[in-house]
Image (tube, rainbow, N blue to C red):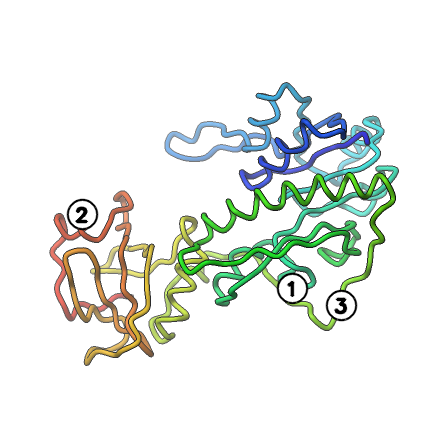
Amino acid sequence: MKTVFMGNPEFAVISLKRLIPSKHEIIAVVTNPPKRAGRGRPLKETSVSIAAKNAQLPVVEIEDLNSEESFELLQRLDADVYVVVAYRILPERIISIPRLGAINLHGSLLPKYRGAAPIQWALINGETDTGLTTFIIEPKIDTGKILLQQTVGIEEYDDYGSLAEKMSRVGADLLVQTLDQFENGEIKPYPQNKDGASLAPKITSTFTVINWQKSAFELHNLVRGLSPFPGAKSTLNGKQIKLYKTQVLECDSDYGQGVVSAIESNKIHIQTLSGQLVVHEVQLEGKKRLSVSDFLRGYSLEIGIKLG
């Protein structure tokens, strides 16, 4: 099939690379234009753009999917199918262009976790498994008919970084399998069960602030879901501090919520509503991410100090 691949972040790169040697012809790769980011604000291309150019594939950078120019450009490509992995919401008339429709790879077992951040929310909610879904894109986000699904287990050590990497590999294989069977007419799309639907909205900056009036279990899962980016944050002596690599200690201390209750050579205990959050890595505002042992060499932290 003549395929247009659409994607932006690193999560989509493995799917693109997996499609390249398949029998499906990638006639173009659609991605966002470069944006200014980081120190000095240099223009930064998307991960998909870099991978596509390295593979000598034609890259189409679209700023506005609703423009007439974008619509006509995509029409001229004359694709059989669009393959969408972590890209953007497609306008209805864009969805209607390819002969066989548009197929999306989504990071959950739909209809659970519809939205922009399914992997993060699965971790934040303490799920023990999640999965991937390929489905036919319809105008209403993440509601289209399901093609194939694959379950992925969530390990105790998983955070957003490790789980997304694992799921990107599983998803790439599922995507090629979907296209093969879809082309051969071996898949019968079926509707989602609306009763099982849940949402996974975009993670906002406000949500990343730690509320110490929650349990250690809840906060541990928040840290997992936000690590390595954007990071779960609090404040320490007036400066922002992000917490990484935590564990739950179920017993309580005599200290109040958000208070440092114990300090060891390589970990910090912080009392929560229920249980203590044991922290192994931190990043103080303006500094690098460090193990607690390295952090304590340069920072005088005392038991009884309150965070947040």
- Spatial CA distance of label 3 from label 1 is 10 Å
Left or right of residue 183, residue 202 in this image: left
> Is 160 left, or right, of 173 in this rendering?
left
Quarter residue 84 falls in = top right
Residue appearing at x 65%, y 54% in the figure? 150
The reply to whether callout 3 and callout 2 are in contact (CB within 8 Å) is no
Is 93 rendered above or below residue 196? above
Quick one: label 1, few (<14), some, or many (20+) residues within 10 Å? many
- Residue drawn at the location 37% of the way across and 75% of the way down: 215
Callout 2: helix, strand or loop? helix
Q: Residues within 10 Å of mark 2 (few under 14, many from 20)?
A: some
Q: Quadrant of the C terminus?
A: bottom left
Q: CA distance from mark 3 to mark 2?
A: 50 Å
**In the image, residue 304 lies at what x, y percent?**
15, 71
Q: The residue under label 1 is which amino acid type?
A: Lys
Which amino acid type corresponds to the residue marked 3 in the rendered image? Asn
Residue 156 location, x and y as percent? 42, 60
Label 3 SS: loop
- Residue 44 at x, y = what percent? 50, 30
Mark 1 lies on residue = 112
Out of 92 and 264, give the one closest to the viewer.
264
Residue at which label 3 appears: 193
The residue that label 2 is drawn on is 294
Q: Secondary structure at mark 1?
A: loop
Q: Nearer the viewer, residue 240 or 264?
A: 264
